[in-house]
Image (cartoon, rainbow, N blue to C red):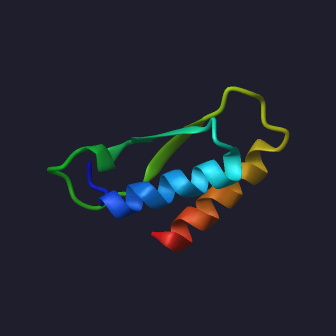
């Protein structure tokens, strides 16, 4: 996985802050392969309940995570 431990901690913290403690986040895409270079950070956020405004939550998550990374 091509994320530093600090980046993983930041991502998990932001997801839990904005989506709730029950949220899980998974990395997928090219960043899971150590032998590749570049690529964006593809994240799947899973929640055990429906979200009233999923597009708004996704935008907030993307903005905060992008600024912090």
Q: Residue at x 69, y 57 (%)?
A: 59
Question: Residue 43: percent from the left, percent from the top?
Answer: 49, 45
Relative height, residue 49 to residue 1 (above, below):
above
Determine whether, in the image, residue 21 is placed left or right of residue 9: right
Between 54 and 11, the residue placed more toward the observer is: 11
Q: Residue at x 18, y 49 (%)?
A: 34
Question: Residue 63: percent from the left, percent from the top?
Answer: 62, 65
Between 25 and 38, the residue placed more toward the observer is: 25
Residue sitting at the far front: 21
Q: Is residue 49 visible?
A: yes
Q: Quadrant of residue 62?
A: bottom right
| Quarter placement of the C terminus | bottom left
Relative height, residue 59 to residue 19 (above, below):
below
Q: Residue at x 68, y 26 (%)?
A: 48
Residue sitting at the far left: 35
Question: Residue 54: percent from the left, percent from the top?
Answer: 75, 43
Question: Residue 42: percent from the left, percent from the top?
Answer: 45, 48
Q: Residue at x 73, y 50 (%)?
A: 57
Q: Is residue 40 visible?
A: no
Determine whether, in the image, residue 35 is placed left or right of residue 3: left
Determine whether, in the image, residue 7 is placed left or right of residue 63: left
Relative height, residue 16 to residue 3 (above, below):
above
Residue sitting at the far bottom: 67
């Amino acid at each position: 996985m091509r994320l530093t431990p600090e980046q993983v901690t930041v991502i998990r913290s932001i997801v839990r802050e904005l989506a709730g403690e029950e949220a899980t986040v998974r990395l997928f895409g090219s960043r899971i392969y150590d032998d590749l270079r570049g690529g964006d950070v593809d994240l799947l956020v899973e929640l055990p309940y429906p979200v009233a405004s999923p597009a708004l939550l996704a935008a907030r998550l993307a903005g905060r995570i992008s600024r912090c990374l």
